[in-house]
Image: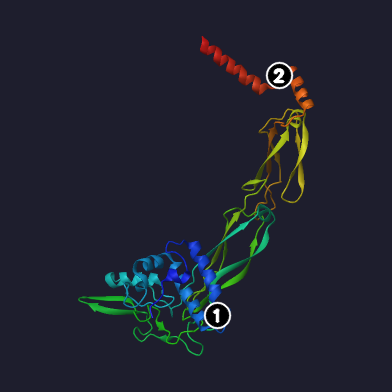
Amino acid sequence: MSKRDFYEVLGVARDADEKQLKSAFRKMAMKYHPDRNPDDAGAEASFKEVNEAYEYLKDSQKRAAYDRYGHAAFENGGGFGGGGGQGHDFSSTMSDIFEEFFGMGGGRRSGGRERGADLRYNLEITLEEAFNGKNVEIEVPTSVTCEVCTGSGAKPGTSPKTCQTCGGAGRVRAAQGFFTMERACPTCQGKGQVISDPCDNCGGVGRTTQERSLSVNIPAGIEDGTRIRLAGEGEAGLRGGPAGDLYIFLSLKPHQIFQRDGADLYCRAPISMTTAALGGQFDVPTLDGNSSRVKVLEGTQTGKQFRLRGKGMPVMRSSQFGDMYVQVTVETPSNLSKRQRELLQEFEQEGSGGNSPESDGFFSKVKDFIDNLGN
């Protein structure tokens, strides 16, 4: 029976991006997982089919080969030579091509044990969470060591056997004229062992896909774009190989009041025209749940910046804090009452009297410029 198209198995278009592939895989894996369908042999077969499809399409090299050659890229006698089968490593196939023509040898794998892939998880947190720090519980879909075969890939009660073709070396030699060429063993694909009776749960790969809950510590003061590495929490290795790592990439949600620059915080505060002219004060919130008072001097102009020392973000691995900078903007009153309009008109009639030095200076320059044009 011929294999179904990998894109059809996952239910995605051929131009699907990495995020769409991952989302489709999670949905299908949850649907056909053996734990949810204990008495359905068809669901188990579909689960293995989904795992195999995602295993190839998530890797850019494997996907490129599949898009060009289809299943033949990974099967015996296919366009890439060297056997296929579930969990086949495409990079080893490409290596075999170079080895066959140029004799470029590679390291032998010990019993087919391969390190698992590193995983990435994007985590978005609020500015308040970055200020205080917290522990976050995340759900990570990943490959884990098969519990049935404990990662060996062989059915319980059996074990992988030494490859008869290469004697466990993982490599074979062939004479071609005056030269002796060495390449990966075509029977075991360089692993040195073969599994004659594969585990029913993982199909001989030694790992299965499931969601894991992990607790991540977010330290106070962490910055946008920080990468957190959790060693050994990535994809399980093939046939008992070491697990990869999990990398968590942090991003901060936009805040409705503050902008952050390192350990410093910035915000803008509108004040009334009368407060700016006569002086006054106002309160601004701080991320520790309190507030700080800003005193406005008489004659404050738009753009004036006030510095609140130690009211910014905590500096990681220290007891220091950044500063907060509050920039004021003078708000022009609108929807004036009749009396308010009369008062402003009276103020205007009194004349500026040097109360507006910036505008007086600007228009004085404008007058001089126009006069010079006339001469």
Residue toward you, 76 or 25: 25
Furthest residue in direction bottom, as rendered = 157
Front: mark 1 or 2: 1
Residue toward you, 318 or 166: 166
What residue sits right under mark 2 in the picture? 354
Callout 1 environment at 10 Å: few (<14), some (14 to 19), or many (20+)? many
Residue toward you, 53 or 319: 53
Furthest residue in direction left, as rendered = 177
Please report the residue visible at 46 percent of the width from the left and 61 percent of the height from the top. Answer: 17
Quarter of the N terminus within the rendering: bottom left
Please report the residue visible at 69 percent of the width from the left and 36 percent of the height from the top. Answer: 328
- The x and y percentages for residue 332 are 70, 31
What residue sits right under mark 1 in the picture? 34
Tag on residue 13?
A: none
Q: Is residue 175 left or right of residue 305?
A: left
Task: In the rendered view, tell whether residue 249 sits above or below residue 62.
Answer: above
Please report the residue visible at 55 percent of the width from the left and 66 percent of the height from the top. Answer: 246
Q: Is residue 107 left or right of residue 148?
A: left
- The x and y percentages for residue 282 are 77, 39
Task: In the rendered view, tell whether residue 239 sits above or below residue 62.
Answer: below
Q: What residue type is disc 1 on?
A: Pro
Please report the residue visible at 77 percent of the width from the left and 36 percent of the height from the top. Answer: 281
Q: Quadrant of residue 169?
A: bottom left
Residue toward you, 18 or 339: 339
